[in-house]
Image: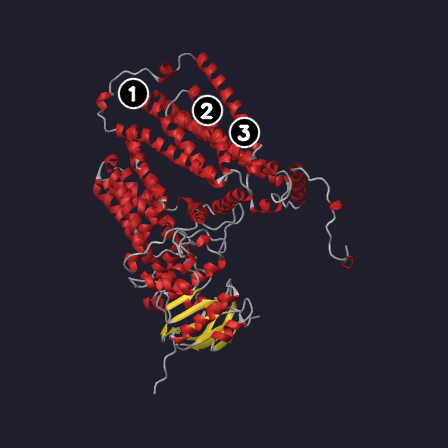
Amino acid sequence: MSAADGPVVFDPADFGAIPSARVLRRWMRKVRRGKADRTFSQQFEDIYLIVFAVVMLGATGGNVLLNLNDKSAACTSSSCSWLLDTVPFILVPLLVSTMLRALLSIGPVSASRATAFWLLATPVDRAALLRPSYRLVVTAAALVGALAAVVGWALFGAAWSTVGEAAVLTTVLLLFTTCATVWAQQSATRSRWALRIADALLIIAAIPALLLAFRQSQPSSQTAGVAITPFDEVQEPGLLALDLRLLVVGVLALAVAAVLVFVTARTLDRLSRQTVVAGGDLLAGLAGAAITLDVSLLADVVAGRHWRLKGRLQSRRGRGSRAIALIHREFLRVLRWPRRLVIAFALLIVPYAVAGTGYDVLVPIAAGLAGFGAVRPLMDGLRSVCRSIGLVRALGMELRELRVIMSVVPGGFAVVWAALAEPALGSPAVAFAVAAGILTGAVRQASARPPSYSGPLVASPMGAIPPGLFSTPMRGFDLLLICLAPVLLGLSDLWIVIVPSIIGMILFSISPKQN
Amino acid sequence: MTKAVPRLAVNGLRHLYAERPVIEDLTFTLRAGQAIALVGPNGAGKTTVLKCIVGSAEPAAGEILLDGAPIDERAETVRRDVASLLDDLDFFPDLTAAEHLDLLARAHGNAEPEDLVDTVLDDVGLLGAADQLPGSLSSGQRRRLALATALVRPRKLLVLDEPEARLDAEGVAWLATMLVEEKKAGTSILFASHDAALVDAVADETVTLTPLP
């Protein structure tokens, strides 16, 4: 149309029937294919690499799992039997709780901002437009359920038929969970209730874990020497009967789940654009962080979203001045997100539970990793100053000085945490090494620079990457391991104390680099 | 009679970006209570000059003196006396607007900053948003909060990069008034700006930068 024709006037005759989502997607695929800059052989090579990696990992992991299952199944003591009986009561509520939280944080049905703006605003069937995202979530939940159940049950020596039964039931349970979260996504009140249920399930999971943790304090003579029949003979009345039960239960459960998944898919048009975009934004942020393999950045994205959704808080005045003021503010900050503290203390169960299983060698490592998981989220303040040179200037202190000051509160928490884990760890020296490892590791991870793509890059099969990209996820854990090395090597208490002390002194005396 | 030492002296400043000069032989002085505006098109090097002054960028040649001594961003006097607002300021995601200002004032040695914080929040028009977290502030409000961070701390030199950015017309007018008041209080101001009205209202001198070929 030329300019002489005048402005465009709406003419209903220009518009026909609303296209289906399928037609729209097909059109978009066609347009995108026209712009593709990768040949078929390049794509085939990528797919081949992915399939090869999955097969290799599956084969290796499967083999390790088979061996561990054999070894665990050979254990016929009552404590092993008790462990196997208890694990489902920890694993299942924990899995459902984690799944509820994870799914609700991404939606679970999500869409990119572009999809929301360009497609969801049109009269095209919204449920059909959102169905691919829904299918993806359902598939992921089913896979996670099956995988977690197989690993969880097999690790503790369950018979393979029991593992299969557990996998089917857990998968179905997580499919129910997914459908419930889609229903919850439709209103803020439902979402809040779903989150409360997730918290309740976490508490339910903690009860048997606590029982397991305190079981280690019972005298071993109560169980030692008692002849116990192996699991397979106790738990499996007959292979045929069990197989039949598995078949019937599995088919029934899967049928119910399939119906529920189908019915839920028909309700997707009730989802608002706002709720699906929030998850899309989070996924985009997480994907960006995942590309850099930066764990801290992933945590930043999650924490940033948490506070954005919160929006407003009652301001609290500080106390003192200079370093005291910063330490006090850090203390208030830690109290501001109580769930993190609850989880941090709940993680104390880990060293006790590992000690309860009798794998004493693993206790310091398990305690170190659990403590790391407990303390690292308390370092948001340090993370903020380390990623913003402007904030450091505004605070009027050197970054090295700020790093020390902002580590005081998490450091104190690490000491308390390790002291509470001391009975499981066995000695105050080991507890010291664990506390030092947790603190230095978490500080190193929180204050590290993200990989920079603006500097020199190195060639790799994945394209150009910054040097040291692949060591990024290990950052922090390396110091934890070094601090725990004297414990793992069975050195004397003197070395167990000296090595982490030196690591701590070096870490806090050097200035972190900034971009 | 001895000549007063300028608050800030920039002599023969040269800066390279990817081995290409972006600033060549820049010289100017800024006295106490004076304001200088850096003007020029995008890419002329205004932000780079400010970054060199606050220590975010390393000059290839030349010297920058604060009260007659070479400027070093690690020195306590510089951290205490130079308040800057460049594009690299981020916020703590879990502290409210009021808590940010409270923390900053205390970090600079003010043990009882409650009244100061309330006054500054009122001045920058954020009293109603005192309890809001930075993620829930609009971009203009975030800019006002960033400006407020410079007002709750001691300062002899204010270094501002396009302080008018993202502010509405009323905000720019408030900013001009605030900067004039700062000058009267003896603060030296060096700012880069594209807003001719703001430059006219605040600057005693302008330094025009042009992109180097």
Residue lying at 73% horizontally and 44% vertically, measured from the top left: A15
Say which amino acid is labelled 3.
Val
Quadrant containing the C terminus of chain A is bottom left
> Are discs 1 and 3 both within one chain?
yes
Residue lying at 49% horizontally and 17% vertically, measured from the top left: A248
- Residue A5 horizontal/vertical position (percent): 78, 57
State if disc 2 and disc 3 touch (CB < 8 Å).
no
The residue under label 2 is A169
Disc 2 is attached to a residue of which chain? A
What's the CA distance linking mark 1 and mark 3?
41 Å
Viewer-side label of 1, 2: 2
Choose between A316 and A219: the one closer to the eye. A316
The residue under label 3 is A261
Question: Sequence-wise, which precedes: disc 3 or disc 2?
Answer: 2
The residue under label 1 is A78
Question: Sequence-wise, which precedes: disc 1 or disc 3?
Answer: 1
Q: Is residue A306 left or right of residue A47?
A: left
Element type where label 1 sits in the image: helix
> Do we see residue B162 in this rendering?
no
Say which amino acid is labelled 2.
Leu
- Residue A237 horizontal/vertical position (percent): 40, 12
Q: Residue furthest bottom?
A: B1
Sort mark 1 into few (<14), some (14-19) or many (20+) by Cα contacts within 10 Å: some
Element type where label 3 sits in the image: helix
Choose between A25 and A401: the one closer to the eye. A25
Disc 1 is attached to a residue of which chain? A
Say which amino acid is labelled 1.
Ser
Choose between A186 and A4: the one closer to the eye. A186
Disc 3 is attached to a residue of which chain? A
Sort mark 3 into few (<14), some (14-19) or many (20+) by Cα contacts within 10 Å: many
Sort mark 2 into few (<14), some (14-19) or many (20+) by Cα contacts within 10 Å: many
- Residue A373 horizontal/vertical position (percent): 36, 41
